[in-house]
Every structure is written in structure tokens, then in C-alpha cells.
Amino acid sequence: MQIEFNAKQREAQGTGASRRLRTAGRVPGILYGGTVAPQPIEIDHNEIFQHLRKEAFYSSVLTINVDGKKELCLLRDVQRHPFRQLILHVDFQRIDATHAIHQKVPLHFVNADIAPGVKLSGGMVQHVMTEIDVRCLPKDLPSFIEVDLQNLSGGHSLHVSEIALPAGVEAALHKGEDPVVATIVVRGGGAAVEEEVAAVAAPAVPEKKTPEKKSEKTDKR
């Protein structure tokens, strides 16, 4: 998916200058990476706001047009107003079309309703992961990855190694890792599975040691 947006070179910098830009309906930002110095930019608020409403904008290779010069980039950070629908700042990273990139890509789950664990066992699908970190060339970066649950049975889990990744795309994992992506928990008799899912989804909390209580008995002499 090709997504292009416009930006301008930002001359004035600092808190006051950024405040004036926002008042004028512009969003300050930065374009960094590559062999050139970071470039301060400004973007029309309405344009970037509409782009940020689309899931693909967060996981696609973007084309930024800065005063007529087009470059490939990835969205790296967005600062938002705590309670108003305002974008305060955006960060973009330049990329090279010939070098592999790392990017988080959302997962789209399909066929959960016909999975044996749901249809036959009345189980409930739990999404342990909603996005995955991948490594690929910019041209191969997908806007999302589809996860097919049609063969998942109750009490069983689907791991990253079982996902069908697009050509040229690989999961960016540490050696030996194969995390759970989704599982189907069946109520009634599925307690052990629920405990296993909880252990995968949440980091282990070290057990607190309870201090030994002193004996209430006193030595009477």
C-alpha cells in the first residue's frame, strides 16, 4: 500500500515556535535517520490526523514529500494531547529501500467462529498477541498479517512459528523463542489452560516472602 503525505521544512524551533505552529493548524515533527542530519518538519494537522485514523499508517512504508523532495520513511512516534483530539508532535525515520527494516505489524484474526474449539467445544478465543515484530525489505512490508484460526481446538494454542508469513517476511524473534499468539480456552475443565495462558500473557511476579511471626509466648521466670 502506497501512502504519501506532504510536509514542509520547519525553520523556527523551540517551545514557542511549536505552540504558534499548533495554533495555526500545523503539527511540528522531525524526520531523522540515514546519512543526513535530522530535519525539522511541519505538517497540516487535518492531513496527519486523518492518516493517523488508519491502521495501515502505523505499519506501512510511507512516502513523505518535503517541499517537493520525496523520501521513504516509517512512523516512529506520535505525541497526542491528553484529552483533546490534537496531534502535538510526530517522528518519522528515513529508510533505505535496499536494507531490511524492523517494524511491528498488526495481526488480523480470521475464522475464529468456525474453529473446532469454538464451534464444537464452546470455547473462547484469547488473543495473547495483537501485533508482531517482523524483519523484511521495505517493499515486502505488509500492512497487516492474517492469522487463520480455523484448525485451532479447545485447550490448544497457536504459536508464531505456525503463522503463514508473506514472502520475504520473517518474525524478529530471539533464538529459541516461539511465543503464543492465540489460544482457545474452554470453560469447565479448562482451568489448567487458563493458568497457562495467564502465565504467557503476564510476566511472572516474584513471590513475596512473608516474614516469620515472632512467638507470642514469653519466657516467664
Image (cartoon, helix red, strand yellow):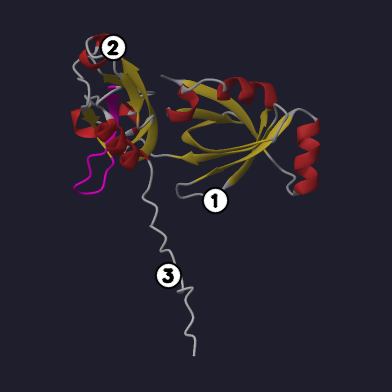
Asked where in the image residue 142 lies, by quadrant, the reply is: top left
Mark 2 vs mark 3, CA separation in Å: 53 Å
> Label 3 belongs to which residue?
212
Helix, strand or loop at mark 1:
loop
Q: Nearer the viewer, residue 43 or 126?
A: 126
Mark sitting earlier along the chain (2/3): 2
Is residue 24 shown above or below 221? Answer: above
Residue 184 colored magenta?
A: yes
Q: Position of residue 16 (x, y in %)?
A: 80, 46
Mark 1 vs mark 2, CA separation in Å: 47 Å
Q: Position of residue 154 (x, y in %)?
A: 22, 21
Q: Residue at x 44, y 68 (%)?
A: 211
Is residue 214 shown above or below 54? Answer: below
Residue ranking furthest to the bottom: 221
Q: Residue at x 48, y 29 (%)?
A: 58
Helix, strand or loop at mark 2:
loop
Asked where in the image residue 19 lies, by quadrant, the reply is: top right
Is residue 38 shown above or below 183? Answer: below
Q: Position of residue 147 (x, y in %)?
A: 28, 21
Q: Position of residue 39 (x, y in %)?
A: 59, 44
> Label 2 belongs to which residue?
111
Mark sitting earlier along the chain (1/3): 1
Residue 203 colored magenta?
A: no
Residues marked 1 and 3 touching at CB (< 8 Å): no
Residue 205 shows in this picture: yes
Crowdedness near tag 1: few (<14), some (14–19) or many (≥20) residues, C-alpha within 10 Å: few
- The three-letter amino acid code for the residue at tag 3 is Glu
> Magenta segment, which residues?
172-186
* Left or right of 159 on screen, residue 98: right
Helix, strand or loop at mark 3:
loop
> Label 1 belongs to which residue?
37
Q: Residue at x 73, y 47 (%)?
A: 13
